[in-house]
Amino acid sequence: MFTLDLLTPNGAIVKNVECDEVLIPTCRGEINILPDHTHVLTTLGTGILTVRKGETKKYYSITHGTCKILGDKISILSSTSETADKIDIDRAKRALEKAEKKLKGEESLTEVEMIKFQRKLERAKTRIEIGYLRGA
Amino acid sequence: MANIKDLKKRIKSTKSTLKITSAMKLVSAAKLSKAQGRILGLRPYSSELSETVRVVSAITKGYEHEYFKENEENNRAHMLVISSDKGLCGAYNSQIVKTVRKFVDENQDLDIKVHYIGKKAKEVIGNKVNVGKTFTFEKADPSFDEIRKIAMEFAEGFTTGEVGKVFVVYNSFESAMACHPTVEQVLPFSLPTEVKKEIMDKYPFDFKYEPTAVEILDTMVPEVYINSLFTAMLDSLASEHGMRMVAMENATKNCQDMIRKLTLKMNKLRQAAITTELIEVVSGAESLNG
């Protein structure tokens, strides 16, 4: 058993919540955290954060940031995060289409725009995925 | 002696002032609750972020980032003063100005160039200190990207050696009633040796880093720096609305007091006039009856 903080610049999504298992998407793939884990500091990728407490699982979308695991405390700092129930799948689908179009489109993109739309694409994909997990 | 007509005029004008102040109070209250939500939401994030960087940079041996480099010989400094564009917010701007003056007086050996967000402070101290740029935003609430741009401008000045220090002066938000002016050194990040030792004692182990400590710190350190400016900005906004709300509440109360006093005075005068008229009528009738 350990506690989890999920903080974003727009507010704390989760604060001091007890959980049994956390699945964190890092920049080098997912890591699974169980109690008594070693101290870790890692950068996050875009993806789904899965938090299990007993039999219930909760899903959150997270984007770039860092994650600190210190003793029985996990702090996740992400630039944005949403809980599964707040995600609007239709909106995410529209965003996905738009981003795909931009990336495939004829208009030449600058490097900054390219990264921007790639990130948008990643975020939209994550949202849709979470949306389906919530439905399941 | 004031006559009834003058008093009526004054009451009327005070009433219209009352309408304005109470409307401004309501607007500020609404803006405050939004700004308060933003700053209170940001604080846990930014404190956790800077704490992590402090700890990791202390326990990572030999870590160097350009934002950490102390340059004692360089006595030039940038100072960003965050005030408001509009007045009528109590001591909000004046306490900022006072703090800047005090700081400049106490640090005569520093050659400080003062930059502004919000024009009120510039209006007051603009001719007394070395004036730099004034930054403006598209909307009243600056976005993170806008702050990032400003932050990067200062960081560039710091890394190229143009200045040795960067300060930010802002009103730190405590509650709707209280805020206090703060001078914060944002660059370089100073981590005194005793603090470093304290951290080393507290964390006698190292983290497992993914990818590497240096790479993580390289991305986190600029984040902390920009975040400290962003926090200062949001602190200022919340303080401004809070101070304005309080100032307008006091003004509204004063207006009500004034109206009450003036009305009383007017009624007294009117009663006196009626009495005089009555006496005149009665005495006139008496003399006719004679």
Image: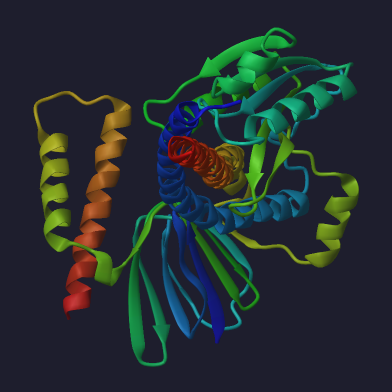
Q: Which of B167 and B182 is in front in this view?
A: B182
| Nearest the eye: B25 or B120 | B25
Coordinates of residue B143 in the picture (x, y in percent): 42, 36
Q: Compared with residue B270, is residue B46 higher up or lower down, i.e. above or below?
A: below
Quarter of the image where one finds residue B163: top right
User: Is residue A44 at all visible to an observer of this figure?
Assistant: yes
Q: Position of residue A66 (x, y in %)?
A: 51, 56
Q: Is residue B257 left or right of B194 when viewed as pictured?
A: left
Instruction: Name the one closer to the observer, B183 or B45.
Output: B183
Quick check: can you spot residue B223?
A: no
Residue sitting farthest toward the bottom: A55
Q: Where is residue B25 in the image (x, y as percent from the top left)?
A: 46, 45
Hey, which quadrant is residue A39 in on the image?
bottom right
Q: In this view, does A52 lie above or below B166?
A: below
- Count of residue discs: 0
Coloration of the structure image: rainbow
Left/right placement of residue B193 relative to residue A11 reads right
Seen in the picture, residue B105 relative to B227 is either above or below; the reply is: above
Q: x and y percent of residue A47 in the render?
A: 33, 61
Q: Which residue is situated farthest in the front direction here?
A: B290
Q: Is residue A41 above or below residue B28?
A: below
The answer to which image quadrant residue B89 occupies is: top right
Residue at 54%, 56% in the rendered image:
B40
State the residue at coordinates (43%, 35%): B288
Q: Nearer the viewer, residue A63 or B36?
A: B36
Q: In which quadrant is the N terminus of chain B drawn?
A: top right
Relative to B143, is B236 on the left or the right? right
